[in-house]
Amino acid sequence: MRLTTRIGIAAAALLAATTVYTATTTPSVGNYGKAPEFAGVDQWLNSPPLTMSSLQGKVVLVDFWTYTCINCINTLPYVKQWYDKYKDQGLVVVGVHTPEFPFEKSTDNVKAAIKRFGIRYPVAQDNSYATWNAFSNQYWPAVYLIDASGKIVYKHLGEGQYEETEAVIQKLLAERK
């Protein structure tokens, strides 16, 4: 095979990989159906147990994360900022800590991470992946926005798109007035 053909094949493979990555990180706005309940939560940290039905009428941001994921760590300042900025306007942020590695299942480790990162919003410890599976989630980090009627209307996988995500939060909060 000629070098130019190999380079062309390699370039096409790189383009395909980039396209797939971009497609998974582009925010999606729409109607993804009723938000599932938080399922199989081992511990609720920073909060008594929450249910989607008890959050009806609120805008809910569900953030799937784990404390050793660098991409998750990079998104935390934005999630914390949204919590601080909009919690009094009807936004409820729920971090769903779903471990990637066995040591991340330790409640003490999760509590230490919550303290280290200054997380004040509720965190559901999802060691069995029950909530993860209920959302059909596959990525860390992943943000889902749920409108006041309980429907998932937005999802973003990975880092970035912070301005777009905040704009959807603002829109959903304005709609509940």
Image: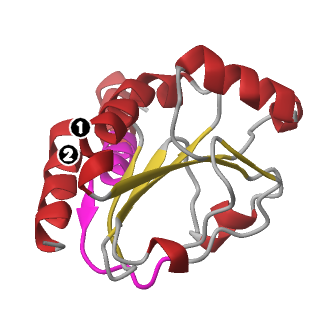
Q: Where is residue 74 in the image (x, y as percent from the top left)?
A: 43, 23
| Residue picked out by circle 2 | 166
In which quadrant of the rendered image does the N terminus lie? top left
Tell me: 126 left or right of 176: right
Q: Which residue lies furthest to the top in this view?
A: 116
| The stretch drawn in magenta includes residue 149 | no
- Quadrant of the image containing the C terminus: bottom left
Task: Tell me where residue 116 appears, x and y as whole percent.
Answer: 61, 15
- Determine whether, in the image, residue 20 is placed left or right of residue 135: left
Mark 1 = which residue?
162
Sort mark 2 into few (<14), some (14-19) or many (20+) by Cα contacts within 10 Å. Answer: some
Horizontal and vertical percent for residue 4?
29, 26
* Closer to the camera in the image, 126 or 53: 53
Secondary structure, mark 1, is: helix
Q: Residues within 10 Å of mark 1 (few under 14, many from 20)?
A: some
Could you tell me which residue is drawn at 38 percent across and 36 percent down?
Answer: 79
Callouts 2 and 1 close, C-beta under 8 Å: yes
Task: Residue 144: give x, y in percent of width and height.
Answer: 41, 59
Residue 72 as seen in the image, left or right of residue 149: right
Instruction: Write down the region rendered in magenta.
Output: 16-35
Q: Is residue 28 left or right of residue 13?
A: left
In the drawing, what numbered circle is on residue 135? none
